[in-house]
Amino acid sequence: MIYQISHNIISPLGFSSEDNFRAVKNGETMLELQNTAFSLPEPFFGALIDDDLLDTEFARINTKKFRYTKFEKAAILSVSKALQQTDIQPNSSRVQFILSTTKGNVHLLENADGFDSERVYLWKSAQLIANFFGNTNEPIVVSNACISGVSAQITAKRMLESNECDYAIVVGADMLSKFVVSGFQSFKALSKELCKPYDKNRVGLNLGEAAATIIYGKTDKPLPDNSIVLVSGAMANDANHISGPSRTGAGLYLAIQKAIDGFATPDEIAFVNAHGTATAYNDDMESLALTSANLHERPINSHKAYFGHTLGAAGVLESIISSLAITDGTALKTNNLHERGTVAPLNTLTENQSCSEQKFLKVLSGFGGSNAALLFKKFTQHNG
Amino acid sequence: MDNRITSYCRITNDAVVVNGEKHTIPRTDSPWLSDIYHAENLSYPKFFKMDNLAKAGFLGAELTLKDLNIDKTEPKQNIAVICCNRSSSLDDDTAYQHTIQSADNYFPSPAVFVYTLANIVTGEISIRNKIMGESAFYVLEHFNPQKFCSFVRGAFSDKTIDACLCGWVEYFNGNCDVLFAYVTRNELKNLDLHIENLYK
């Protein structure tokens, strides 16, 4: 079994998984109008990690006095906090670092800020993160657009199963910049107010910053109750359009089928934590795929109106929140959803509700036509 | 060694080699990747909308698949597309940065921005060939046959996958370094050695 040993979330809502979950359960968000950030010609609605808070926390662990970017600091701090809850030796040759990111230090293209030119390469950031913990194995970067964080967990599972490592540290991170925000603005993909996933009046997404870590291990022995097992994961491509979601949801449906086939029936699934970006096309596409997979009557939620779209962190962050939710026996609502409005009707939740099933599904879709699904299970002595 | 890979393509700054055979590419005033496109008699107008990374990957995939009887119009769920490189999308990132660098010359373009995601190349290849299996993009410091093959073997852990179109596809600042191979489930034995030899 591949299972979560520990995890952490660094986000504007808090610097631990538990603080983030508590805030989400209470319906809190730090998404707000950003008028001055990155000197953009127009404001955007998003959530940024506070630089001072991050610097203060990071200074406590940065004994090397080496200079890091915000992106690297958030990722290192997240891994550090996840490791603190374990007895894993991160410098072991049996520990594999896997970084999930779309843009890493891309902001250095505008202003190198005294860093050398290598610093903008994604592998360089991954090396610096692994080396901080004394790990000298070649780290892997997964850069698969919006599904990166789920792809990275699938990669971790495979490397553990093929005995390439004993522990996989999956860290997903992306920070916002003029580069990223202007690009989404040019796509006319952003909402000027709090995003409304699956709502009839949704008009676009919000962007957010986060770093999130899950440490995976494997075991043949029974786990403590409430441990979270990564049962299966799969990816599929729409083969349809590089930036537009499939009109039919065929790729996402295929990824879901591969992830649940033989592992779960729809009625065993407590909830589906979907992508729910709050763009018109994505949410409609998901409604079609989830309906094809006969999951439309299961509780369905999106975390985007709590955190925004956190890009390379999203798959890791949302898997953690959902893991804590199933342990808590709660199917979380979709924040800011007032009037359901997808092309195929979904059981999207407008209030938190209790759940007793032990499995949940995490799905993501993104640019490049990529789709991914993960099936998780809450371990108990009865279902092991 | 048995189970040698039979369908592959190597593109560098001055050579195109397909299945071990060097192709002659007449040079013109056009960019190198466009010269390859024309010399190989390819017909896919969308090629000219792509960024250099997607063009390099597209060419690698086209030439690798050329002699295989793969129907490009029929959806195929049993093939995976796995790419990796060193510079992710930095070639197009740099181009996009120019469009937003100064306030008086600010013209962010969605057509340029979309290629600032490295995995778009896997999307282009999947669309061209109607491949609906998994697609994924990884970044490494240098070409590393062990890690490359780990990704390919990983794709085969999905039991619905029968073949993997895999490539090292690097393009940055005019430097092109591409190796594509079509690997079937029967060809996984000694894959690291085969891939290392093809890259040399």
Image (cartoon, rainbow, N blue to C red):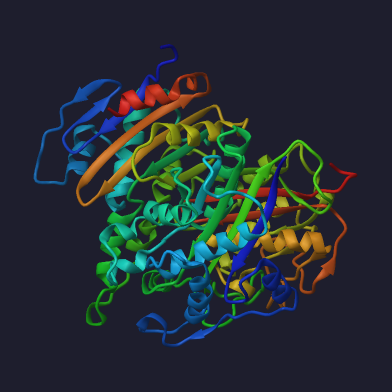
Closer to us: B162 or A26: A26
Closer to us: A208 or B131: A208
Residue A234 in the image, given as x and y percentages of width and height: 62, 43
Q: How many marks?
A: 0
Closer to us: B174 or A319: A319
Q: Is residue B26 above or below residue A322?
A: above
Residue B44 visible in rendering: no
Residue A306 lies in quadrant: bottom right
Residue B31 in the image, given as x and y percentages of width and height: 16, 46
Q: Is residue A110 above or below residue A246?
A: below
Residue A109 in the image, given as x and y percentages of width and height: 29, 66
Closer to us: B102 or A251: B102
Residue at 56 percent across and 43 percent down: it is: A155
Residue at the extreme bottom: A35
Q: Is residue B37 above or below residue A186?
A: above
Residue B64 lies in quadrant: top left
Quarter holding the N terminus of chain B? top left
Residue A216 in the image, given as x and y percentages of width and height: 64, 48
Residue at 63 percent across and 30 percent down: it is: B159
Residue at the extreme top: B2
Q: Is residue A148 above or below residue B175?
A: below
